[in-house]
Image (cartoon, helix red, strand yellow):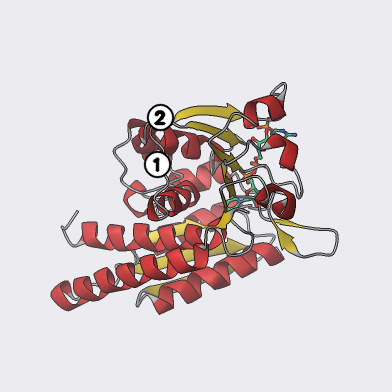
Amino acid sequence: MAHIIDGKKIAAATRAEIAERAKKLTEETGIVPGLAVVIVGEDPASKVYVRNKKKACEEAGFYSRVIELSEDTPEAELLSRLEEIKADPKIHGILVQLPLPPQIDPDKVIAAIPPEKDVDAFHPENVGHIMIGDYRFLPCTPAGVMKMLETEGIEVRGKNCVVIGRSNIVGKPMAMLLMHADGTVTICHSKTKNLAEITRRADILVSSVGKAGFVTADMVGEGAVVIDVGMNRNAEGKLCGDVDFAAVSEKASAITPVPGGVGVMTITMLLENTVRAAEAAAGRA
Ligand code: NAP
């Protein structure tokens, strides 16, 4: 039976360290790390994420601003609101919750966030930093996964790492981080042939597909570490990952649950990036 990697416990310990860093920064410089989160529209999942980000900021002693805009907000109006937020000296990190309504081009919005305040690390300049391995900001979800592996003492060096999914937000930066940690990385996607044959060879398998029950026990090798990034709703409307947790737990050596796994780590790394941005603003980069 697999060891269950407790994301909540790792996140709590990491957040306590971040809160300590924020407190020290405020005591020594008067600067309180500040995060602005912009949400456009009424997507229920996005609203939950934004609420959780605000709560996490408050618990870490940060200042936070949530800017809620209606679903029909024109792109130009969002860009002009960003100008105002960029000029707010209390704000060190800015993120725009994705997805955006169809009238808004997400690439334009991401490019409008100053790279030094882009705590989601989506700006092309920060993506370049990730590629080079000199991180200004950590890509939140993949960095959360790396933190879990590190805390659990799971060595990446020399391991066969398989990432299912190649999105800009999860799959690609996940592969980069594993490669920079000296893993031998294979990236799979919807056009990959013989997927199960590849995933069965993984020492560390990361699934970021977005389909409930996608990773079945026959796709997992005996003793593999299985990281489930997926956040889906099952037939009963319950939050679940990509992995058939019960069956895969019988074969894996370690596994992350959903909820209580990667999700809580993603927000934790967002806090880390925000405190980092505030430290940089104070000349402590
Ligand atoms: P995405 O942009 O939809 O990417 C999904 C990836 O899965 C794509 O690369 C796609 O391949 C691949 N895929 C789809 N069907 C496949 C198949 N049959 N076989 C192999 N690969 C397949 O999604 P995302 O933004 O990366 O998010 C993925 C999941 O992670 C979602 O459930 C999302 O909610 C969750 N998520 C969780 C967190 C967290 O904090 N835990 C953060 C972000 C996202 P193609 O490229 O070929 O289409």
Please provide percent x and percent y for residue 162.
56, 33
Name the residue type under label 2.
Gly
In the displayed image of the protein, which residue is found farthest to the top? 193
161 to the left or right of 244: left
Q: Which residue position holds label 2?
A: 158
The residue positioned 25% from the left and 69% from the top of the image is: 21
Is residue 175 visible to us here? Answer: yes
Is residue 41 among what the camera can see? Answer: no
Relative to 198, residue 274 above or below = below
Between residue 260 and residue 108, name the one nearer to us. 260
Q: Is residue 49 left or right of residue 236?
A: left
Task: Name the outermost residue toward the right.
Answer: 235
For image coordinates 56% across by 73% down, the residue present is: 51
Task: Give the number of the disc on residue 155.
Answer: 1
**Residue 130, placed above or below residue 151:** above
Looking at the image, which is closer to me, 6 or 71? 6
**On screen, residue 99 above or below 260:** above
Residue flagged by tag 1: what amino acid is it? Answer: Glu
Is the residue marked by circle 2 packed among few (<14), some (14-19), or many (20+) residues within 10 Å? few
The quarter of the picture showing ligand 1: top right
Q: Position of residue 82 (x, y in %)?
A: 45, 58
Residue name at image x 69 percent, y 47 percent: 248
Residue furthest front in the image: 1
Q: Could you tell me which secondary element the residue under label 2 belongs to? A: loop
What is the CA distance from the residue labelled 1 to the residue labelled 2?
8 Å
Percent from the top left, x then y, of residue 1? 63, 54
Q: Is mark 2 within 8 Å of ligand 1?
A: no
Cβ–Cβ under 8 Å for marks 1 and 2: yes
Residue 182 appears at what percent x and percent y?
37, 31
SS for dot 1? loop
